[in-house]
Image (spheres, rainbow, N blue to C red):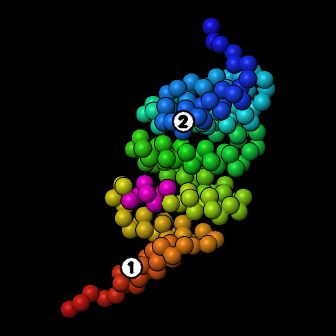
Amino acid sequence: MVETVLDPQKAAEEGQRLFAEERYGEAAEQFAQAQRAYAEAGDGLKAGEMLNNLGVAYRRAGRHNEAAQALEEARETFARLGDQPREAQVLGNLGGLYSKMKRYDEAEARFQAAFDVFQELDDRVRQSETLRALAIMQFKRGQRSKAMATYEDALYFLPNLNFLQRLTRVLLKIRYFILRLPPFR
């Protein structure tokens, strides 16, 4: 018999505390309890948030298949509710998870879908974050040139670049200039 949580908010807060302490398995249990309680109460939005938290906790605990299941369910929940920002956030989380699982085509598709939603919402910061995560995956896959181009695109979307980001953008532009030079003879 599944125990019903009387106060899902307390379970969610306990899950956050345990997550911060890197006790991911225990955090996942709390998020799952909160998710069930919110779902029973008819609060789809909070239930979806708990599914997202559950997926992230499972990922950190190394339980990747369970993480994928929870995150896909969270994505479906937010899509059904028409909550585009949360749906895009979950898509980004799925991209990161699938990248870790070396399911690169699925990861790239999720990152692209997240980017598209953030573009539609005109959320430039999250567009940049999504592209940076995609660039990291591309770099780890050995797609160095593609990763640098993606990272340069990510910097384009940031409203205020710090010194290091401005320097990186200049160096990436120099790279393009050098690559276009004819070979030395």
Q: Quadrant of the N terminus?
A: top right
Asked whether 11 or 107 is in front, the reply is 11
Residue found 49% across the figure and 47% down from its top: 96
Judging by the rendered image, the residue that carries numbered circle 2 is 19
Secondary structure at badge 1 equals helix
**Residue 117 coordinates in the image, percent (x, y):** 67, 54
Given the image, on which type of amino acid does mark 2 rest?
Answer: Phe
As for residue 136 lying within the magenta part, the answer is yes
Q: Residue at x 54, y 66 (%)?
A: 154
Q: Is residue 54 left or right of residue 101?
A: right
Amino acid residing under circle 1: Arg
Give the labeled residue for mark 1.
Answer: 175
* For marks 1 and 2 on the same chain, the one whose residue lies earlier in the sequence: 2
**Stretch in magenta:** 133-139
Q: Is residue 119 above or below residue 41?
A: below
Q: In the rendering, at what x and y percent does residue 164 appear?
A: 48, 73
Q: Residue at x 56, y 58 (%)?
A: 129
Nearest to the eye among marks 1 and 2: give it: 2
Q: Main secondary structure of the magenta part?
A: helix
Q: Residue furthest right?
A: 42
Q: Which mark is residue 142?
A: none
Q: Nearer the viewer, residue 176 or 47?
A: 47
Cβ–Cβ below 8 Å for labels 1 and 2? no
